[in-house]
Amino acid sequence: MQSVITCAGNKTNSNNSDHLNMLTSKADRTATISQTLSHSQLVEARAMPESILSDDLTFIPDKTGADEAKKDEAVPDLYSYVGTDGRTYQGYMPGDFSHEIYRLILDNKLAEAPIRSPEYALDIGTGTGIWALQFAEDNPTCQVIGTDLSSIQPLSWMPNCQFVQENSELQDWVFPNKFDYIHLRGTIACFNDVTTIMRKAFNGLALGGWIEFQDACFEISGVECGSLRGTAMERWSRLVPKGAAALGRDLAKAKLYKVRLEEAGFIDVHERVIHVPGGPWPSGDKAKLIGVYTANAFHTGVVDSFKNFLLAAGEMSSVEVDSLTTQVKNDIRDASIRWYIPMYVVYARKPYNGEAKNN
């Protein structure tokens, strides 16, 4: 089953205006998590105008009626990292933007799968652990484990959340319990063979348990046909997947998650494709905010992290890679370059004994 978010512009949904209220009304939780994650300098979100979050998730490209972007309109900088002491003040860090993008897209839900009263949950590639901590807080009777290659997570202040350093692809899973829910987010570049993860997840889930992937597919497109032609972003978006492939990484494999999950024996497989804007070009206020978040996440984190892929593509020296990276960042801050990237949300269920393994 597949659904694609298709919306055109200016519908109003009162639920969306609650997102800012959610951020501020849960300030205590955000502040606590921010303090806990001090190693990555996470900070509490500053207040923004409520009207910014008032529209539906309206960000499928409208190639016929979209407003013309102003050449002199730059992508707003929400980081505000000012200070000669090297500290970051009053703003979002890249991980915050990524987390908030997913929360906005999923209407403030941490999971799209229809999980009910989970007892055990696993977050693979947990990163800073912010998702695992929030899921543990929202589900106090659930034991949550977050795993990652690097042990950068804080000492958990949540009694039902713990972090484990491991390689989920190469190491055997030795967890004491079967999981009701396994969550993977932003792991598109993490695994050589995602089917290994799916197989291990199938074995590690309880009967009726759910697995969910939330991943971008690295296929950047311009809103208007040919709008990226000749830009640094066009070259970058071509070379990054080429270099990733040379290193054994398929950055477009999210398109295959649905098929691969079915092949692994999962049922009730659902796929949702969301076109995530880069920059403030959408007409809907909520979509515009998502676009600003996405552009800033790329500008401050993603572009630099993909330098190794550019080198692996074999077409540039390290000096040329640095130069292209700078040019791409300039393109990202140019609001006249209107682009988007597809994100896939795919979830599936492990069948009960005797249940048919076809949908």
Image: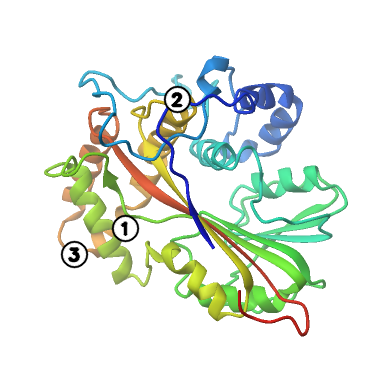
Three-letter amino acid code at the position of disc 2? Asn
Q: Quadrant of the N terminus?
A: bottom right
The percent position of residue 48, horizontal first and vertical second, equals 55, 17
Give the number of the mark in front: 3 or 2. 2
Three-letter amino acid code at the position of disc 1? Asn
For disc 3, the neighbor class at 10 Å (few under 14, some 14 to 19, many from 20) is few
Residue 196's image quarter?
A: bottom right
> Could you tell which of marks 3 and 1 lies nearer the N-terminus?
1
Residue 231's image quarter?
A: top left
Residue sitting nearer the eye, 40 or 99:
99
**In the rendered image, the vertical position of residue 258 relative to residue 232, given as above or below:** below
Describe the element under mark 1 as helix, strand or loop: helix
Q: What residue would you read off at disc 3?
A: 314
Q: What residue would you read off at disc 2?
A: 10
Q: Quadrant of the C terminus?
A: bottom right
Query: Could you tell me which residue is drawn at 61 percent across and 38 percent down?
Result: 107
Q: CA distance from mark 1 to mark 2?
A: 40 Å
Three-letter amino acid code at the position of disc 3? Gly
The reply, left or right, for residue 167 in relation to residue 117 is left
